[in-house]
Image (cartoon, rainbow, N blue to C red):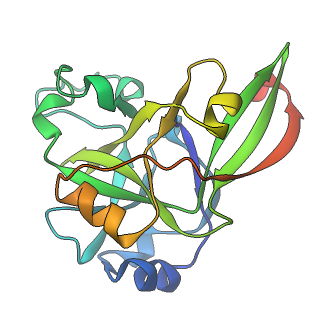
Amino acid sequence: MCFHTKLTKKPRAIEHHFQAKFEAPELFSPEEHINGFTFPKTPVISNWDPSKILMMNWGLLPEWATEDWNRTFTLNAKWETISEKPAFRDYIQNRCLIIVDGFYEWQQRGKEKVKYEIGFDDEIFALAGIFNRNTYSVVTTEAKGIMREIHNTKQRMPIALKTREEMENWMENKEIQPRFDFTTKSEGPIQTSLF
């Protein structure tokens, strides 16, 4: 699954890349490691108004959710079952681009986990998402290619969108083909107690 991302670019570079403007640029600061389990606000472009970059909380909150709703269950949405799940099915048409310049996955090697930074040579790109109001979920699919080797336990990966055409197709509810041409950097074994 995808629970850790990064976005190290400055607001101007992000605005230029997506041809959109931050609605509240003062709420954004570049981050080397964004942990979804803290439900952070990150830059997102919705299909309701693609000219604006909004700061939304990671972890979709359905309309019917109570105050004690556990958003860890909605950090990711499996594409294959998205229309069946009550937390997601009402928001399939609410498409968004989650702006990143990389994400992190851990490969299990015996008792150790090896952290990998994954992306497109440090370029800005987007992860496919769905949203409700000011919250979102990262949409995932079955891992293929290098991601199948890295994410060797759950066999999942986020749907990454690199080209303008891919992003437009996602936002307009058209068919897309998940990308598998990621570049990776390994950061060596880590202590599992840190995560």
For residue 178, side relative to residue 105 (left or right): left
Query: Which quadrant of the structure image shows residue 105?
Result: top right
On screen, 14 above or below 107? Answer: below
Q: Position of residue 164 (x, y in %)?
A: 36, 71
Residue 84: x percent and y percent? 18, 20
Q: What x and y, as percent, mark residue 135?
A: 28, 46
Give the quadrant of the C terminus.
top right
In the image: residue 1, left or right of residue 149:
left
Residue found 71% across the figure and 49% down from its top:
117
Number of numbered discs on residues: 0
- Picture residue at 21% right of the left edge, 26% below the top: 87
Residue 118 image point, x, y percent = 66, 50
The answer to whether residue 54 is seen in the rendering is no
Q: Residue furthest right?
A: 188
Considering depth in this image, is 77 or 7 the residue closer to the camera? 77
Q: What residue lies at 42% left-to-right and 33% top-to-bottom?
A: 141
